Image: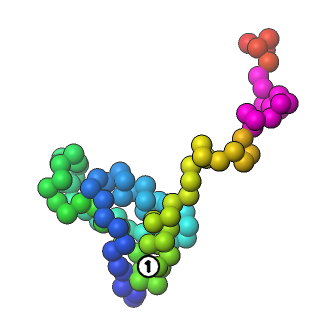
Amino acid sequence: MSSSVKVASFLNQTEALIAAEYLRANGIVATVMGDDAGGAFSGLTLSKGFRIFVPRADEELARDLLANPPSSSADTDEGDPSDSSEPAETEVNPDEY
């Protein structure tokens, strides 16, 4: 059984879950650990926050992915259908309704 290492800490569960899902989408097994009393204290930072653990073999890749997240689609112009001068094929005909 391989050991796991902590690669990140977050103050709230939502941020930790988003980051862990990003790692999973890139093929890394990620586990979120933290305690907010089952949601009773979800807005309070009384604990050590939420931590993400990955297998030791994936530590370097996980840290790199978290340090360099992809840019949002709003930052790029590639593939933006609104830039096209031709109408999109999925346009809805208002006469149909």
Q: Residue at x 50, y 64 (%)?
A: 68
For residue 36, what is the image quadrant?
bottom left
In which quadrant is the C terminus drawn? top right
Q: Is residue 84 left or right of residue 1?
A: right
Image position of 26 with respect to 43: above or below: below
**Residue highlighted by disc 1:** 59
- Residue 83 covered by magenta stretch: yes
Q: How is the image coloured?
A: rainbow
Q: Amino acid at mark 1?
A: Glu
Image position of 4 with respect to 38: above or below: below
Q: Residue at x 83, y 30 (%)?
A: 85
For residue 9, what is the image quadrant?
bottom left
Q: Which residues are magenta?
A: 81-92
Outermost residue toward the bottom? 1
Q: Is residue 95 left or right of residue 37?
A: right
Q: Position of residue 65 (x, y in %)?
A: 50, 67
Q: Is residue 70 left or right of residue 30?
A: right
In which quadrant is the N terminus drawn? bottom left
Q: Main secondary structure of the magenta part?
A: loop
Residue 24 appears in the picture as rendered: no
Q: Position of residue 30 (x, y in %)?
A: 42, 69
**Of helix, strand and loop, which one carries label 1?**
helix
Residue 70 appears in the picture as rendered: yes
Q: How many marks?
A: 1
